[in-house]
Image (cartoon, helix red, strand yellow):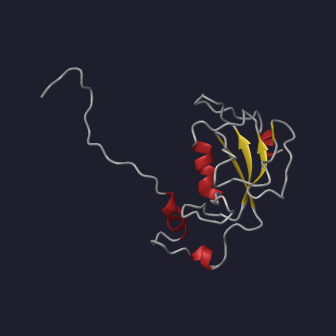
Amino acid sequence: AYDNRVCWVEPWTKVSLLNDRAQWIVQSGTEDYKPWYDLELRGKGQVVAVSDTGLHTDSCYFFDSNGTVAKERVNAPVDMTKRKIVQYVAHADSFDDSGHGTHVAGTIVGNRLNSDGDEIGSANGIAQDAKISFFDIGYRFDSDLFLPDTVEELLD
C-alpha cells in the first residue's frame, strides 16, 4: 500500500556484538583456531598506542584495583605498574560517551576481570596481555574529533 508519510521500508534484523569471535577471525579466519595464542603471542610486555573518542577506564576490560592512571592534557605521565592503561592523554577530554574508543581499545588490548581479579573474558582483545597508551581526541557529546595540530604533538 502507498503512504506518502513512509520514506523507506526494510526488514528488521537483529544486531549482535561479535567481539568474542574477533580473536580467531584476526588470527586465522578459522573458527576457534588461534595460532598466535598457541605460540603464546598475547601482547605481553608490549604497549599499544590508540587515539579515539575516549576510554572508560572503569570498564571491566581495563579496571585496575590499584586505581587509574592520571588523565592529563599535557605531560600525561606513564605508569608501567598499571594493569592495562599506562597513559591517558586527555587531549580533548577524558570521557567516552559514545563508547567507540572503549570498544576499539577493548578489541585490541581488553582483558576482562571479575571482582575477584580472575580473568573471565570470552571477548578479550587480540593482544589481551598488552597495555595501552591512550590519546583522547573525542569531545563529550560531540561527534567531531579534536585532532592535534601536528604528528609530533600526537607522538610526544
Residue 109 falls left or right of residue 98: right
30 to 117, vertically: above or below: below
Q: Nearer the viewer, residue 36 or 68?
A: 68
- Can you give x and y, in whole percent of width and height, for residue 17 in the image? 46, 53
Kindly identify the residue that appears in the image at 58 percent across and 30 percent down: 143
13 to 2, vertically: above or below: below
Kindly identify the residue that appears in the image at 76 percent across and 37 percent down: 90
Which quarter of the rendered picture does the N terminus lie within? top left
Residue 37 falls left or right of residue 17: right
- Can you give x and y, in whole percent of width and height, for residue 31 in the image? 45, 71
Kindly identify the residue that appears in the image at 72 percent across and 33 percent down: 93
- Can you give x and y, in whole percent of width and height, for residue 39 in the image? 64, 79
To which quarter of the image does residue 26 belong? bottom right
To which quarter of the image does residue 149 belong? top right
Q: How many marks?
A: 0
Which quarter of the rendered picture does the C terminus lie within? top right
Residue 65 falls left or right of residue 125: right
- Can you give x and y, in whole percent of width and height, for residue 153 in the image? 81, 39
Instruction: Residue at the far top: name it.
Output: 4
